[in-house]
Amino acid sequence: MSEATPLASLTTMRVGGPPRALLTATTPEEVVEAVASVDRAGEPLLVLGGGSNLLVADEGFAGTVVQVATRGITVESADACGGVVVRVAAGEVWDDVVARAVVEGWSGIEALSGIPGSTGATPVQNVGAYGQEVAQTVMHVRVWDRTEARLRTLFNADCEFTYRHSLLKESMRVAGQVTPRYVVLDVTFQLHPTELSQPIGYADLARGLGVEPGARVPLPEAREAVLEQRRRRGMVLDEADHDTWSCGSFFTNPILPREQYAELVARAAARLGATGPVPPKFPGGDGMVKTSAAWLIDKAGFAKGHGLPGPAALSTKHTLALTNRGSARAADLVALAREVRAGVREAFGVTLVNEPVLVGLSL
Ligand SMILES: Cc1cc2nc3c(=O)[nH]c(=O)nc-3n(C[C@H](O)[C@H](O)[C@H](O)COP(=O)(O)OP(=O)(O)OC[C@H]3O[C@@H](n4cnc5c(N)ncnc54)[C@H](O)[C@@H]3O)c2cc1C
């Protein structure tokens, strides 16, 4: 056990003070024991994977961090009917799992290449990119239920996956905690046994591949094209590139009732001219409209690199990423996030919602 490791050294945003205690668990039994003992003691708990979706206060965390460092990828079954059923330990690095799937000819997660962090965190916010999300391939999730103090299996439908959300994430909001009620021990995916990608569902990606949307390409080509797109946007971790000292996208894309989207269009016309650009519009489910947070930020007047030279600034490659230029503190990032959120609200009447989990902080 160590008491002083600052969370800055365990998170991709590279800010945050030390926790009261840090435990590293390398087996599912150790994860359960560590989590259960912290909960029994009534201590605040932060379960940590790769630290790529966390913004931690400069004061640190007044509780215990349990770092999940379990390993293991097991093929449970593989046949033409049921597909390839693969169980992955929560602590496995997600991109290693995707790379293995591409090599093995397991299709269904190739568009999620290059996303940092652990496999156990992927169901928490239903990780997604380039037209795929884990909700499409998660079969079930084995969890430790902290409330009932027992092991459980949550099937896909139990997880209540929606855009960047799930039962697990919701359980944090309900309890006002930074760790879900359900601590993930392993995730079982059902993948397609084929050398071809799933249909390319993202226009830019299709263009990069030189194919029509909906086409299928060899898995390695799909992975390379995704990584190429991500690198251009500063969305692949690179120690030398401050544009990647981030949590990825800092705000989720707003999902608005139709009337609010119409109001947004009117405000955009008033601000940008009647023949000016129109806010992007995607289906948001249940008659809702999803629009683009990056578009709103840009059109509210925050260009790429806003805030440079720092210490905190928007990425020079993508307006949606808040980045640490080297010496930022959590307070600098929170100030920037508030500025952007207030600017977008004033310009368009839309309140952006943060995607990363805030530890000891609020916007
Ligand atoms: C450069 C960059 C690009 C990114 N791109 C994307 C993207 O394209 N799409 C996307 O969806 N996300 C993206 N992200 C966000 C992030 O990578 C994902 O959310 C990732 O799944 C977080 O995993 P992690 O292990 O780092 O979680 P952490 O940051 O360690 O934890 C995040 C939350 O999950 C909880 N958690 C972690 N492990 C477990 C577990 N085993 N059981 C229960 N709860 C757990 C934590 O308690 C915390 O509440 C990006 C981040 C960065 C830095």
Image (cartoon, rainbow, N blue to C red):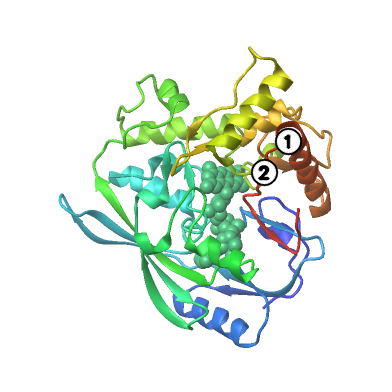
Against 20, is 301 above or below? above
Instruction: Say the numbered circle drawn on residue 329.
Output: none
For label 2, count other residues whose C-alpha is less than 10 Å away and answer few (under 14), some (14-19) or many (20+): many
Dividing the picture into quadrants, the one containing residue 345 is top right
Residue hosting label 1: 344
Report, in whole angstroms, how far the alpha carbon at label 1 lies from the one at label 2.
8 Å
Is the Cβ of the residue at disc 1 closer than 8 Å to that at disc 2? yes
Q: Where ligand 1 lies, by quadrant?
A: bottom right
Q: Amino acid at mark 2?
A: Leu
Residue 112, x across and y down, in percent: 45, 43
> Who's the residue at 51% across and 57% down the image?
118
Residue 261, x across and y down, in percent: 58, 33
| Residue in the foreground of this view, choosing between 218 and 41 | 41
| Residue in the foreground of this view, choosing between 122 and 84 | 122
Residue hosting label 2: 352
For label 1, count other residues whose C-alpha is less than 10 Å away and answer few (under 14), some (14-19) or many (20+): many
Q: Secondary structure at mark 2?
A: loop
